Image: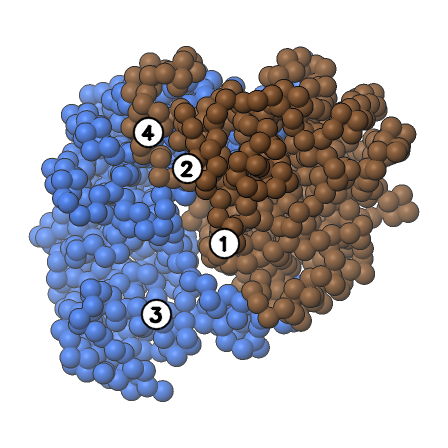
Chain colours: A blue, B brown
Amino acid sequence: MSITFSLDKSTRTLLYQQLAEQIKSAIVRGELTEGMQLPPVRRLAAELGVSTTTVAQAYDLLAGEGVIGGHVGRGTYILSSPLTALARARAPFGGDFQASSSSLSTCQRQRLDWAAGWLGGLAPQASRAGRLQWLTQRALERWGDPSTLLNLSSGYPDVSLFPIERWERSMARAGQLLAEEARRAASLQVLQYGSTLGDEALRSYLSHYFARFGFQAEPQEILLTSGNQQGLDLVARVLLAPGDPVFIEEPAYLAALDIFEQQRAVCHPIAVDEEGLRLDLLEQALEAPAVRPRLLCIVPTAHSPTGATMSCQRRQQLVELACRYNLLVVEDDYCSELFYDESRCEPLPALRSFDREGRVIYLKSFNKLLFPTLRLGCIVAAPPILARLVEGKQAFARGASLPLARALLEHLSDPAFEEELNLSRQEYRRRRDTLLNLLEEELTGLECRWTVPTAGFNLLLVLPSQLQEYEVIEKAADRGLLLAPGQLFRVENSQQQPPSVRLTFADKSPEQLREGVKRLSSTLRALLHGGSCSQGQASPDLFTAV
Amino acid sequence: MSITFSLDKSTRTLLYQQLAEQIKSAIVRGELTEGMQLPPVRRLAAELGVSTTTVAQAYDLLAGEGVIGGHVGRGTYILSSPLTALARARAPFGGDFQASSSSLSTCQRQRLDWAAGWLGGLAPQASRAGRLQWLTQRALERWGDPSTLLNLSSGYPDVSLFPIERWERSMARAGQLLAEEARRAASLQVLQYGSTLGDEALRSYLSHYFARFGFQAEPQEILLTSGNQQGLDLVARVLLAPGDPVFIEEPAYLAALDIFEQQRAVCHPIAVDEEGLRLDLLEQALEAPAVRPRLLCIVPTAHSPTGATMSCQRRQQLVELACRYNLLVVEDDYCSELFYDESRCEPLPALRSFDREGRVIYLKSFNKLLFPTLRLGCIVAAPPILARLVEGKQAFARGASLPLARALLEHLSDPAFEEELNLSRQEYRRRRDTLLNLLEEELTGLECRWTVPTAGFNLLLVLPSQLQEYEVIEKAADRGLLLAPGQLFRVENSQQQPPSVRLTFADKSPEQLREGVKRLSSTLRALLHGGSCSQGQASPDLFTAV
């Protein structure tokens, strides 16, 4: 079988993006299947009449998405991925799909071919979070032994720091108080549909909780959500129309990129430095006469993936800019409590604390602070904005869970909570320091740079520019090290950036971090000494240039 | 001030809809404000050169949305509504909004005028659920005494039947088991982000729970949600594009209409009778060469608002039709456990139990069965469909809450649950019978018809066709009786139906039902003897016909 690619230099889509898209389409059409080898970069470049960089970039993109993978000297292959799964689902029923569905119930196994046709017209939604999950799963499968695979890609907090015994008491106490309240009220109206804002008791508590971030909110300015993912989604759905431009950090939190891409908003990236968002670039973009986003999404503390924290001065200036240019700012706070500046006992004031015009929509999640499967957070916004968000929440999912809200209330309001926060902060800070020291020790002479996180769980490691991101990910996986490709944190069509990976230190012990950095160092050294682009053997005649 | 309406007979939008839309626009623009009187139906009809029916229908529509209200003989007025609130938010800041925001925090009170401009371009999203909430709130405010207002409009279960003491134990036990599991696993990985499907323990339990509805589902075919609202929203977002046609019952569950309208799907109503969806009409629509929906949304048991249950034979036939015409069926099950047919000990088999091709997406909620602020449910679907829904859930909100899932698991798996279900069934059945007897006694000679619910919480009362729905709602509210307008359960542009109201019996005692039906009867008698259309006094010169 020969496949034809047709690259068009006259369109605005970059050549490497066109090539990557066409390879993906060929996979979904079932023309390229799992295990097939792709031609070496140089050969395909010659056949297509494009530079090797173009082909390498296309491969890089696809590898970052987990669609292809390879080994230096052994070629690049189509991997099992959501795209190959889709191709199977589209194929006439009976082969692969049946084989892989041995665990399905009988009735399901019978005839599902209609589903391929039904779903065929729908665009696949390979989210960045999904791609990262996929990379993780594949690395686990390939490495074989989960106990020795080192996953520095998670972005997760360490749940073993969470005081589960106290949560046990929080749940019991919440149930008890709920039952008492219901008895006192002589009916159980507290259990009935109430305000879409969610439980008032928790909202009242939160209205004071935020004092640590320099602001107060009235209970009726707070809308409970299942976390910042739902919060961001609600903001995007209610306040943006498809095609609307938004400002976002570069690099940015991958789940925020997922949300905006899902809503078909157009992301305009603004670079960050060690003090956070580059306000000079933002102002320049705001002054530009072309498209003008009305909304900016930002993680001012514990920025993901860099771990940077925006300085106090910039926070104030950003809010001033927002007022001057009629910009709505979405402030994503997922763990501002976990800051590592030992000279401070309180976190930096939130953007919202500088806000005199209600221009900041403050999103707070407790899922990373307590444990990820908790699923509770909230939105604080000015009344006219919040009213719209409440309408959306009412239509899309109703209010948040009452028993869950009460359990969180019990947990947060116990004096032990502050002490637990303190211990977490200290432990995470120690791990951050360990990782920073290890990088210093192990990566000298390799032309790597990394950010120094002042809060949160991660840092960003920028790799030597002659390396290909996907090759680093692949080679590291071969050594039992899982890394998150920097590409997942970039707007798809943003200008070319040096290769990078996000490293999570929060959920790893010092020993794990040491082993991880050792594997990383040997991966990089091997790649830098062995050459970078994949130089595979001759492949079957899969490709024909046009 | 004089306002100009311009009705265009050449467009496809019906005249009364045009008029209603233009009145709403005038409210949002601030030209019609709260308390202003609208001209009497006949005068405006004469001025506009349209029939009195057209104007009455427009008023009816607006009254059903809580936008206007009136009293026979005293005229029709613009009410305080989300639209007037929007107009205030759009108005230069300083007046109404400040006055009504005394409880806002200081910084919010300062300057919010930008918000009006920012939000101005966004379409208001007055959901049906929101309109019903609004009607309820307004009736409460007008009647003054919540203790004597009879609300037959809620659609709610009776939370006082819920065994809160047992829920207290369920929460405590869930917390205890979670802590034990975490200790056993020597780490707390159960608390970490896991499968987007949600807690496996609950999914394993549910895979057997559904046997009572005649089917089994593998745990990996189940996706936990916060309820059927989130489930429906996910289905609509992932499987429908804006403009896609869908089949829906007529009348239909108001929240389903909200979801589809939100997704800008085009609803094609199919009438129901006492055996559920009219399959002859469905087949006719499927055979029609014009638009062909690929998805049907249906509540086969305890249909809202009628309380009807689809017969077993029709269930089977519907699934056959779905296979024949390549239709995906969304089965909304919010309380199939609460059936009132004393000859059966098990509920009717679910549509999904007849499904051999995975064409039925089964949505289950436990929120109405236990208590509405619980917020837990699930979706059961064939693997290729579920995979898409999981991708969406991952991007929009991540997985469901673990502690909440465990509390529900404890609660459902206790043997007491079945006995509690039994008691609820008996109590609801008694209340249904009470309401049916009362309607028989009190409404004789009034040309009313009503459905006989075989499950659920509600019935639909069809009113004499000479009455206007909104006038019945208004007059009933004057007597301290709150009714849900039938219009909320109809597709906006569906053909004219006789006026109707939904009556909820589930959350009312026999005494409350008796008093409610008495107020209803006297409302109807007064309207039928006093004339129907609002015949107000002369109003100021607000309207000019064009």
- Mark 1 surroundings: few (<14), some (14-19) or many (≥20) residues within 10 A: few
- Mark 4 surroundings: few (<14), some (14-19) or many (≥20) residues within 10 A: many
Residue bearing the label numbered 2: A231
Tag 1 secondary structure: loop
Q: In this rendering, is residue A336 above or below B316?
A: above
Please provide percent x and percent y for residue B529. 79, 26
**Amino acid type, callout 2:** Gly
- Mark 3 surroundings: few (<14), some (14-19) or many (≥20) residues within 10 A: many
Is residue A381 in view? no
Q: Based on the displayed image, in which of its 4 quarters is residue A287 positioned?
A: top left
Location of the N terminus of chain B (image quadrant): top left
Q: CA distance from mark 1 to mark 2?
A: 43 Å
Q: Chain of mark 1?
A: B
Please provide percent x and percent y for residue A55. 20, 71
C-beta proximity under 8 Å, tags 4 and 3: no
Please give the name of the residue rendered at 22% of the width and 23% of the height, measured from the top-left corner.
A342
Q: Which of disc 1 and disc 4 is earlier in sequence?
A: 1
Q: In this rendering, is residue B373 above or below B344?
A: above
Please give the name of the residue rendered at 57% of the width and 22% of the height, measured from the top-left corner.
B538
Residue bearing the label numbered 1: B10
Q: Nearer the viewer, mark 1 or mark 2?
A: 1
